[in-house]
Image (cartoon, rainbow, N blue to C red):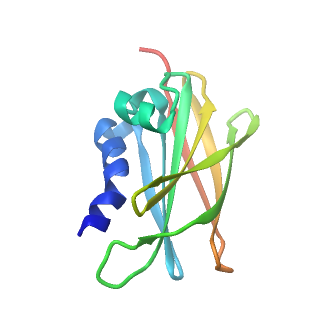
């Protein structure tokens, strides 16, 4: 039971802190794994979470969060290490590579990346994840709109 609580604690803090329209949260099932992903404005991250994980809170910053879980019968899944590569492109075709870093919290493993955003910018994300020790690779594409002004 403790493992489940640790897995969801950080994600729950982020999801509960963000209005539904400001957050894209999805998952994709592939083989023995599930990938969870979301992107949001970094100023929605609660200050205590930002301090703990060295996230720059700013309305001109975005944050992407990726979690890879191995399916385990009777559980929400077991977090696994993975190679996670992320790039994004805005509607004008300007691309950026997003440096991801691994966060460990107990048994939980997250991959987060920060990037600059402009007001009313839509980013199309390309996520490529390969769980450690697996040949399985998943490519996930999703879009997120960012609003930086009041």
Is residue 66 toward the left or the right of residue 128 in the image? left
The percent coordinates of residue 85 (x first, y second) are 68, 55
Could you say which quadrant of the image residue 89 lies in?
Answer: top right
Residue at 40% over, 33% down: 45
Question: Seen from this angle, which residue lies furthest left?
Answer: 1
Residue at 43% over, 31% down: 51
The percent coordinates of residue 105 (x first, y second) are 42, 54
The percent coordinates of residue 53 (x first, y second) are 47, 39
Residue at 44% over, 26% down: 43
Q: Residue 141, relative to residue 82: is it above or below?
A: above
Is residue 135 toward the left or the right of residue 119 in the image? right
Compare residues 84 and 106 and report the one nearer the observer: 106
Question: Seen from this angle, which residue lies furthest bottom?
Answer: 73
Question: Seen from this angle, which residue lies furthest top?
Answer: 150
Quick one: quadrant of the C terminus?
top left
Q: Residue 26, relative to residue 113: is it above or below?
A: below
Compare residues 18 and 150 and report the one nearer the observer: 18
Q: Residue 60, relative to residue 65: is it above or below?
A: above
Q: Residue 127, relative to residue 55: is it above or below?
A: below
Quick one: quadrant of the N terminus?
bottom left
Question: Seen from this angle, which residue lies furthest front?
Answer: 106
Compare residues 49 and 42 and report the one nearer the observer: 49
* Image label count: 0
Is residue 25 toward the left or the right of residue 12 in the image? right
The percent coordinates of residue 52 (x first, y second) are 43, 36
């Amino acid at each position: 039971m403790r493992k489940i609580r640790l897995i969801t604690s950080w994600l729950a803090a982020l999801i509960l802190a963000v209005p539904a329209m400001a957050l894209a949260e999805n998952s994709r099932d592939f083989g023995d794994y599930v990938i969870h992903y979301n992107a949001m404005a970094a100023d929605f991250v609660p200050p205590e979470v930002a301090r703990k994980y060295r996230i720059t809170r700013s309305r001109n910053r975005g944050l992407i969060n990726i979690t890879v879980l191995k399916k385990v019968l009777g559980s929400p899944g077991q977090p696994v290490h993975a190679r996670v590569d992320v790039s994004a492109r805005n509607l004008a075709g300007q691309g950026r590579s997003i440096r991801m870093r691994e966060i460990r919290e107990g048994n939980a493993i997250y991959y987060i990346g920060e990037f600059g955003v402009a007001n009313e910018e839509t980013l199309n994300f390309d996520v490529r994840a390969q769980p450690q020790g697996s040949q399985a690779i998943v490519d996930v594409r999703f879009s997120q709109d960012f609003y930086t002004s009041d």
